[in-house]
Amino acid sequence: MLLAMSHLRQNSSIEAYKLAGTIQRTPVEAQEVLLAMTDEYNLVEPSKRTAKKPFPTYRLRSDVLAAMSRSVSYRGRSFDDADQKVVDHVREYGFVTNQTIRRLFDIHVYAARDLLNSLRERQIIEKIGDARGGTGVKYGPGPKFPRSRS
């Protein structure tokens, strides 16, 4: 599992065939490791496109990716379930703060900052109010905030 996590720090995905060479096991044994990382430890998830294949492609779950944000060398986040939780919170309460993000995902202040910055860069949320920093900063819907699901 540690070798798989090390690979996922530098690459956005991993397959059993790739992991098999790294851990010097068969692809079936590598798939068992990936399944344990999915079912027992909730670290990875199969991609939607390959989920039904015998050997799907796996990626870090969004909460794990957010928690590991400084350890992960690749960027390029798409809209995922962590983003959806933040959007749902903003819909319900009208705003979100760094402290709210930390509580929602049980992550460090810097990981929460990185998640908020990512959402701001993609214009999903934007800073509201006059606060310049600290606990008073609130974020509301931005220009590209998703429309509500009817």
Image (tube, rainbow, N blue to C red):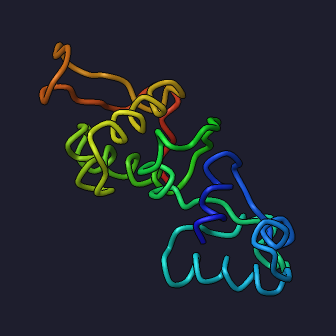
> Measured from the top left, where is residue 29 in percent x and y?
77, 86
Quadrant where the N terminus sits is: bottom right
Between residue 3 and residue 89, name the one nearer to us.
Answer: 3
> Measured from the top left, where is residue 139 in percent x and y?
29, 30
> Measured from the top left, where is residue 57 in percent x and y?
77, 66
Which residue corresponds to the image point at 59% horizontal and 67% vertical from the top-left? 44
Between residue 72 and residue 117, name the one nearer to us.
Answer: 72
Which residue corresponds to the image point at 78% horizontal and 65% vertical from the top-left? 22
Between residue 110 and residue 9, name the one nearer to us.
Answer: 9
Q: Is residue 48 shown left or right of residue 73?
A: right
Which residue corresponds to the image point at 46% horizontal and 39% vertical from the top-left? 70
Between residue 143 and residue 131, name the one nearer to us.
Answer: 131
Q: Residue furthest front?
A: 24
Above or below, comparing residue 1 to residue 101 in the picture: below
Above or below, comparing residue 133 to residue 3 in the picture: above
**Quarter where residue 2 is shown:** bottom right
